[in-house]
Amino acid sequence: MNPNEDTKLIKETENNKKIDKNINLNKNKKQENKTTNSNEQNQGDKNNKIINLIIILIFLIFLSIFLINYFMKNVAMNRFFYLLDNNFMSPSPQPIKGTKYSKSLLDVENICSKNKNFAILRRTNCRACGLFSYYIVHLGCIINFLKHGYIPILEVGSFSNVFTGKNHVNDNPWEQFFNQPCGYTFEEVVKKKNVKVFECECVDDMPDEKSVYDTTKMWNYHHQIQEKYMGVKKEILKEVDDIWIKLFGESKNILGVLMRGTDYTAIRPEGHSIPPSISQGINDTKNMDKKYNYDFIFLATEDNKIRNKFIVKFGEKLKYLLPEKQVFYNYKYKNFLTYNYKVFGKMNFLKTYLISMIILSKCPDIITARTSGAAGAFILSKGFRNSLVYYLGEY
């Protein structure tokens, strides 16, 4: 064989070996890449499964908490209705004579620790009554039942009223706004054996909304009672502080004005105080403002006509809160305000109303007619520097 041909054959053989080697290397790399990609994909799938499982687990936890709370509330209310069926409601015990301003309830030692029996109190005889009508009567019931050796629990969820609307609900809306007198909740008490149900009635121990404005003794006493036994929830007080800053900043020189209209002027409910006219309220506000040069004027009203006329007179100096959905009610509304479909059973509206009265209670000066809301503002307050309270007779 020709040496040149041998050399050529050797080179071709070597080249073929190199090609085979490269092919094998490429195959190995591809195999490695496939293995790596497969491992990464498997790891990614595992991670996705873990994340999905965590999400499902979190969802199930929250669902379980919701269902437990829901059924616990239903259990509590069902237990209460059973209690009602087997423990007929009794009227409030008669107030103890000579103890109207009993200082024993304000002693450092808590009377709740001495009382052994529980009394669930329901005011079922006043469907048209508003939030602060309940507030005043409940305050009197607390005092009366504490004196009689009971631990009172206020309940408004099991019957039709301004808190619930036409039907009962599965919780106790009162506890969304106020603390219970002795720290026990409605849900805790319905499980106990030593519990009775009573009608919460007007008693001598309750604040007199016709005289609370000028009787210092009554004002101070009921202010201390509400702080000790029926304080507003901390989260609502925090919200009030935030709203105050939003409305007034750091200013403290505020005039609070409460003007009722709608049902007060349209249907003239018997026994209720006659409110001032809009022009009288505006003129007295202007005079007070001229004397004390307020930074702002806070107006609490549910009446669209009153609000608009005050805005015309005081402009940006006037501040107010808007009820639910920013709706004010026409003064020609021919029924009790509590029966309005935007008020009856609407907790957002009631919350705005409560916050408005708390803001009034924090103002240094106030102008108001005699209403349950005004009485509540006085009881919540620590005292006013100046107050103008109209009394123009009763309907």
Image: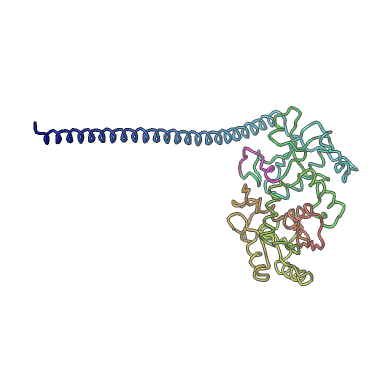
Nearer-the-camera pick, 116 or 391: 116
Residue 65 point in image, percent of width and height: 58, 34
Q: Residue at x 20, y 34 (%)?
A: 16
Quadrant, the N terminus: top left
Residue 258 point in image, percent of width and height: 72, 60
Quadrant, the C terminus: bottom right
Residue 271 point in image, percent of width and height: 76, 54
Q: Is residue 275 left or right of residue 321?
A: right
Residue 386 point in image, percent of width and height: 81, 63
| Colour scheme | rainbow
* Residue 95: quadrant of the picture: top right
Dominant SS of magenta comes to: loop
* Residue 394: quadrant of the picture: bottom right
Nearer-the-camera pick, 176 or 159: 176
* Residue 115: quadrant of the picture: top right
Can you name the residue that lies furthest to the left here?
1
Q: Residue at x 71, y 43 (%)?
A: 125
Nearer-the-camera pick, 362 or 304: 362
Q: Is residue 17 left or right of residue 391?
A: left
Can you name the residue that lies furthest to the right here?
98
Residue 173 colored magenta?
Answer: yes
Q: Residue at x 70, y 67 (%)?
A: 278
Part of the protein shown in magenta: 166-177
The total of numbered circles placed on residues is 0
- Would you place residue 293 above or below residue 24 in this image? below
Residue 292 colored magenta?
Answer: no
Q: Is residue 324 left or right of residue 216?
A: left
Q: Is residue 308 left or right of residue 195?
A: left
